Each structure stands twice: as structure tokens, then as C-alpha cells.
Amino acid sequence: MQRGATDVAKSLSLAAAVLPEENLGRVVLITDGMETEGALEPVLEDLRTRNVSVDVLPISYQYDEEVWLERLELPKFIKLGENYEAGVILSSLKPGKGTLVLQENGHEVSRSEINYQAGKNRFSIPIYLRQPGYYEYNAVVEPADKTDHLQENNGVINSLFIRGKGQVLLVTHPEGNPRDWETLRDDLLASDRIVNVHSAFEMPSDPMSFLPYDVVVLANVPADAFDAIQLKALRDSVYDLGIGLIMLGGENSFGPGRYRRTPIEEALPVDMDVSQKKVLPRGALAIILHTCEFAEGNTYGKRITKQAIQVLSDQDDVGVLV
């Protein structure tokens, strides 16, 4: 259910649309009278011309106890190995107490009992960043008296991304030959890069999971080694997050790897279709040999014949008349 706005006019139009034209209808409107979107008068006039009556059941309410989190503040400039603080801004209509929980990448890192006043409150939670990567923080307040009206506004999310050494995700064929990528891996390690080698089955299915990497390398992996969710996640990470993508050549890459009309084709700067084809016609060669009246002439004739046959393709025909 959307709580951001109220469009009474659209609700009445939808209700009138399902009423049979040949029958008189009646619509019961339950509302607090707060119309934030749409134009009600034209809809009421249309219902009046159709003899559709609208009965209104007014409702009233008052929120006198509400707690919500406005934002989660994280440091802008970060060095690894140092302590920092996450700031949680909490607002409340009345004083109260509760529990403030902070999660880092889905794992709880802090749980503390808090007392808050009416209005805005700020709470600081220490955080410690151990290694480069993507950190997502989720703060949630749990009021102690359980009188909070809306649970949807009790949480806020923010994130950090810390760069370290260049990281490369090298994706390999589960049944492929390691020689397809071992040399590249060794060269990347020698250039002081961090290289994570994963099989196609282990490649992430969430675009945000690619954030720690500067580039993803597909090392002779066919498209059917991935599922549709993985391919779309990699495409979105390139388009939306700026992650690099390299596809190494091979019998399982590009067109032969069945990447045509896949999300990966959208992410790469090349098309998998062959727009221009060079077609060589089938050829035929007839060789007529006769006696050569010079030293070793017949021998040279045989050698020339063999060399001529070797340049032909498997589709060509050849005939020799001695």
C-alpha cells in the first residue's frame, strides 16, 4: 500500500469503471478528506451524469505517538584501520526509550538501549573498517513501549565504498582449461593487483556485489554457464556502477559462446552478429601433365602439382591428367 499520497479522483474513476453502464450504481468512499493528488470535481460531475451516487464514510485519526529515523550519517573521508562514527538522526513526537540496532552488510555490529526526547535526537555508533570494499549499513529503532504507529519509517540505509588495491574478478569455465587464464592471472598478480578467481557458478547475482572489483574478466566462458540473473547483474554493474568488463577470445566467447542477444552483448562494445561475410566460391582445378624435355622435368611437374593441390580448400575439386 502506498502511503505517500492520496488520489481520491483516481479511486472514484476506477470504481465507476467497473460499474455496469446499464445499471444504477453506488460507490462508498471511506476517506479522511485529505486529497493530495488529482482533480475531484470533474470525476464527481461524470458520476452525477451517470446517476452514480457516492456515499462518504468519514474517518478521523490522530498520531500522537510516532518515532522515525530520518537519516544515517557516515564519514566521507576514510582510512583503513581507523575508528569512525555512524550518526543516526531520530525524531519522535514524544519522549521515550527503545533499542537502536546497526547492521553492516547484513550482520549486526551494534545494539544499544537509548532514551530519546521529543523532536530530533542524534546517536553516535562506532564503526571500524578493516579492508577495502562495499559496506552497507542499516539502522533500525525498536521502541520499547510498542506504541509506534508506522513500522515502515523505523529504518534507514546508507553505504560506503572504500578503494584499495585494484581488484579483478576472473570468471572461469567450470570445465574449462586453466591455461585459458593462468597466464593472465599471473601477470595481474605481478602488477600488484588482487585477483579473485571464481567459476561461473560463483559469479554474483547482485550488481552491488561487483562494487569491490575494478574489472570483471570472462575467460572463455560460454553464456549458458550463467543463469539469466547473473548475466543481468553483470550488465547492470557495467551500465549503472561503471565496473569494467573484458571478454577473452576463445571457442566459448562472443558469438560462438552464444552471447548474441544477451545482457552481456549490451555491455560489450561489439555486436555478436556478423554484419559482413566473406564467402569464397567453390573452386575446381584441372592439371594436365605432359613430358618435359629438360633435366628432371617430370619430377618438377609432380612437385608443382602437389604444391597447387595444397593451397586448395576441402570444398574444392581437383583433377590431374597424366
Image (cartoon, grey):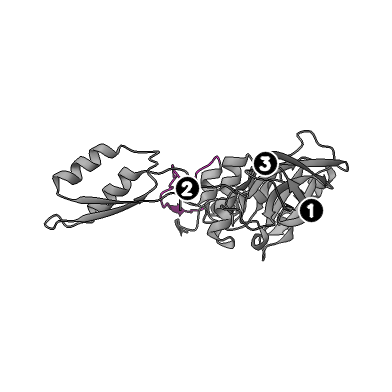
| Amino acid type of the residue that numbered disc 1 sits on in the rendered structure | Ser
Q: Is residue 252 visible?
A: yes
Q: Nearer the viewer, residue 224 or 135?
A: 135
Q: Mark 1 highlights which residue?
A: 112
Report the predominant secondary structure element of the magenta stretch.
Answer: loop
Q: Nearer the viewer, residue 208 or 19?
A: 19
Q: Is residue 276 magenta?
A: yes
Residue 205: image quadrant is bottom right
Q: Nearer the viewer, residue 163 or 26?
A: 26
Foreground disc of the pair 1, 3: 3
Mark 2 to mark 3: distance in Å?
A: 24 Å
Q: Mark 3 highlights which residue?
A: 118
| Amino acid type of the residue that numbered disc 3 sits on in the rendered structure | Ala
Task: Name the residue at 81% across, 41% down.
Answer: 85
- Where does the image place residue 177, in percent across and percent down from the top left? 70, 62
Residue 3's disc is: 2
Q: Residues within 10 Å of mark 1 (few under 14, many from 20)?
A: few
Q: Identify the element where label 3 is drawn.
A: loop
Give the magenta part as a residue range: 269-292
